[in-house]
Image (spheres, helix red, strand yellow):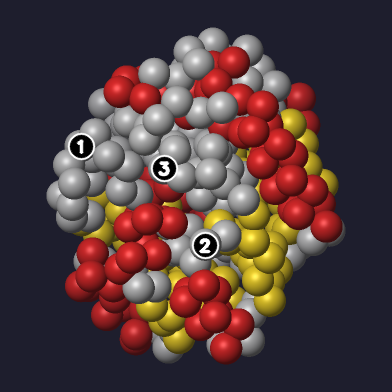
Amino acid sequence: MIAPLKRVIMRRPDAAFGNADPAKWHYTSQPILAQAQAEHDALAQTVRASGAEVVYHEASLPDHADSIFVFDPTWITNEGAIVLSMGKILRRGEEDALAKTYERMGVPILGRLTGTARAEGGDMMWLDEHTLVVGVGFRTNAEAIRQLRDLLKPQGVSVLAYDLPYFTGPEACLHLLSLISVVDEKMAVIYPSLMPVAFWQLLMERGFNLIEAPEEEFVKTMATNVLAVAPGHCIMLEGNPITQSRLAHAGCEVATYRGAQISLKAEGGATCLTRPVWRS
């Protein structure tokens, strides 16, 4: 989650995002497309400035407003991509579209979730190279955990599952990564009030330094949604001065981006808007 980022997929907002019905997509209001594109372009430039190549996912996805959040439809392992099956029904179809972009890039497909399995990338994080942590909630289910364990066992990967809280219900987007972002070796920014107790205890046992985001910045400006572009170097949404200050005090170098359209209206931060495919 923190090794130097070398190649990342992004998807520039298009008409599907600009025309999104807020009630249908659970947005705060309809995005203004020109402003959204300008914000996205600036974020992409910030990612490039870190030393990463940005590859655009340009497959046709009409009426898929959330497709700008390329982190969720797949998961990347050392052996290739796992094509997931989205828990949010409106997002079904994004998985195969992103898989085609991988094929164009030469990224192998390790496997696919099938049947009743549902999982989204936002519910998954690497604790270390051999430990995958998965949040089980409205977007990810137990059958997905079972299939992920089967797919990853040959790589020597253990999959640890933790139940997520109800919070504001099934229509909202509460992923595991809504609550935590790893930003440096054994360092993470978290919102502890909603974290599974056993997961918090595991982090403490592993010796993590946990930087807490205040409630206001978690609720209003997604302070825990932080993209690490290298150990101790990260990108976060602007408007989180307390969390940003705490990260800086812990030794992190923090860049910010403006996300009034692409983040605040649509429940997705820097992590959601990027899909790392190669970290050195």
- Residue that badge 1 annotates: 170
| Residue at image coords 31%, 48% | 174
Q: Secondary structure at mark 2?
A: loop
Looking at the rendered structure, the kind of residue marked 1 is Pro
Instruction: Name the mark nearer the viewer: 1 or 2.
Output: 2
Q: Is residue 5 above or below residue 206?
A: above
| Residue at image coords 78%, 42% | 54
88 left or right, relative to 7? left
Q: Is residue 215 above or below residue 132?
A: below
Mark 3: few/some/many CA within 10 Å (<14, 14-19, 20+): many
The answer, for residue 110, to whether it is visible in the render is no
24 left or right, relative to 57? left
Q: Earlier in the sequence, mark 1 or mark 3?
A: 1
Q: Which mark is residue 273?
A: none
Dividing the picture into quadrants, the one containing residue 20 is: top left
x and y percentages locating residue 126 in the rendered image: 49, 61
- Residue that badge 2 annotates: 239
Looking at the rendered structure, the kind of residue marked 3 is Glu
